[in-house]
Amino acid sequence: MSRKARAVIDLDAIRHNYRLAKSMAPQGRALAVVKADAYGHGAVVVANALNQDADAFAVACVEEAVSLRENGIEKPILLLEGFFDGEDLKAVQEYNLWTAIHDLGQIESLKNWHGSQPTQAWLKIDTGMHRLGIPPELTRSAFEQLSSLPHISEVVLMTHFSCADELDNPATHDQIDCFNRACDGLNAARSMANSAGTLGWFDALADWQRPGLMLYGASPFVGSHPFGDKLRKAMSLRSEIIAVRDIPPGDVVGYGATWMAEQSTRVGTVAMGYGDGFHRQAISGTPVMVNGQMTKIIGRVSMDMITVDLTGLTGVNIGSDVEFWGETLTLDEVAPWYDSVPYTLTTCLTPRVHREYLNR
Ligand SMILES: *Cc1c(COP(=O)(O)O)cnc(C)c1O
C-alpha cells in the first residue's frame, strides 16, 4: 500500500484559468508561468496540458527550461531571470529559449555572442520593485542596442509589479505610469501583468500577460473579486486517517505537548507532515476536512504525521479521507492559518506527495 499523502490536480481547471487570463485582454497573448515545477503542480505535466492553448511558457532558470524541452515542449520558453553565464547562453542557443535582459552587462555579453538562431529578448525595466531591471531612463538606449544585434529577432519591453495584489495601493499606478513613460515611442510589444495585474488592473493589460498563481486557481486578492472568483481550484491536498484514539480531558497531543484536551477527545492521526512539505507553522485550530466534515488540526505538525480532532464527526475510521485544501476549503482561505500565502503552500510540497492528475 502506498502512502496516501497526495495532491490531486485537475488539468481542466488549469486550462480554464489560462483561458480566463487570455480573455482579460482578448487581443493579448499570455505566457503560462510554470517556474518552480509549476508552483508544485508538476511543470512537465502542466506544460503538456497547456501546450495546445499556451502562446509561450516562462520559467526561472535554464534547468527548468531544459527539462521542458527534453520532455517535448516546443512552444517558446522565456527565462524570466535571463542568463547568468556563458553556459546559460549556450543553452539559450541550443534549446532555442527567449531570455530576459535585466542588466546592461547582459547586453554586453550578447554583443560578443554569435548565436546562429535569432531569439527574443525581454528587456526588463525596474519601475519600483527594485529587484531586477534596468533604470527606466536607460530604456531607450538599451532597447536600441538590443534591437541592433543581429541575433535578436524581437525585443519585448517588460516590468514587474510589487503590490498589484493590493487593489487600493497607488504603487501600481505609479509603476504603470513609469513604465509607459520609459517605453514611450518605442515600437515593441509590452508586458506588465502577473496574475494580480491580469485580473485586477486593466491599465496593466498590455500585449503579453504573465499569469502564474492564477493558473493554479488561487486568487491573488484577499476576499471576493469579480474575476478572482471565476478561477477554478486546481489542487486538492489529501491524505487518510491512519490511527484513531480517545483521550480524556487534561491529556496532551503531539511534540512539545502544545495542545491539551478540554473534554474527552477523539484524535485522528493523518499521514501528512513537514516531510511532505506541509507547513509546520500550521497552528492548532487550522481548518481541515475529514470525511467531508469540517474540523481542525490539533497539536504540532511532525515530519510524517499530523493530528486532527475527530470528536463529534460521523463515519470516520482508519482510511477516512482528509482534505487540507481544495474545492471546499480553498487555498486562499487556509493560507493565513499556515502563516503563509497560497504560493508557498503548493510550491513547498516535496516529491513524497504523489501527484495525481485528472483530465490529462
Ligand atoms: C513569477 C513571475 C510571474 C508570475 O507571477 P504570479 O504572481 O504568480 O502571477 C510573472 N512575471 C515574473 C517576472 C515572475 O517572476
Image: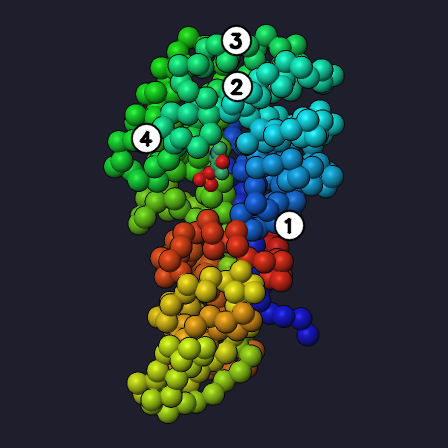
* Sequence-earlier tag: 3 or 4: 3
**Labels 2 and 3 touching (C-beta < 8 A):** no
Badge 3: how crowded within 10 Å, few (<14), some, or many (20+)? few
SS at mark 3 in the image = helix
Q: Residue at point 56% right, 13% down? A: 146
Q: Which mark is nearer the camera, 3 or 1?
A: 3
Seen from the viewer's position, the closer of residues 297 and 85 is 85
Q: Which residue is mark 2?
A: 104
Q: Residue at point 34% right, 20% down? A: 178
Q: Which residue is mark 1?
A: 360
Q: How far apart, in angstroms, are the residues tagged by discs 2 and 1?
A: 42 Å
Q: How far apart, in angstroms, are the residues tagged by discs 2 and 4?
A: 25 Å
Q: In the rendered image, which quarter contains the N terminus?
A: bottom right
* Sequence-earlier tag: 2 or 4: 2
* Sequence-earlier tag: 2 or 1: 2
Rendered view: 36 above or below 117: below
Query: Of the numbered discs in the image, which one, if any, rests on residue 172?
Result: 4
Q: Which mark is nearer the camera, 3 or 4?
A: 3
**Labels 3 and 4 touching (C-beta < 8 A):** no
Query: Of the numbered discs in the image, which one, if any, rests on residue 144?
Result: 3
Residue 20 position in % (x across, y down): 46, 38
Q: Which mark is nearer the camera, 2 or 1?
A: 2
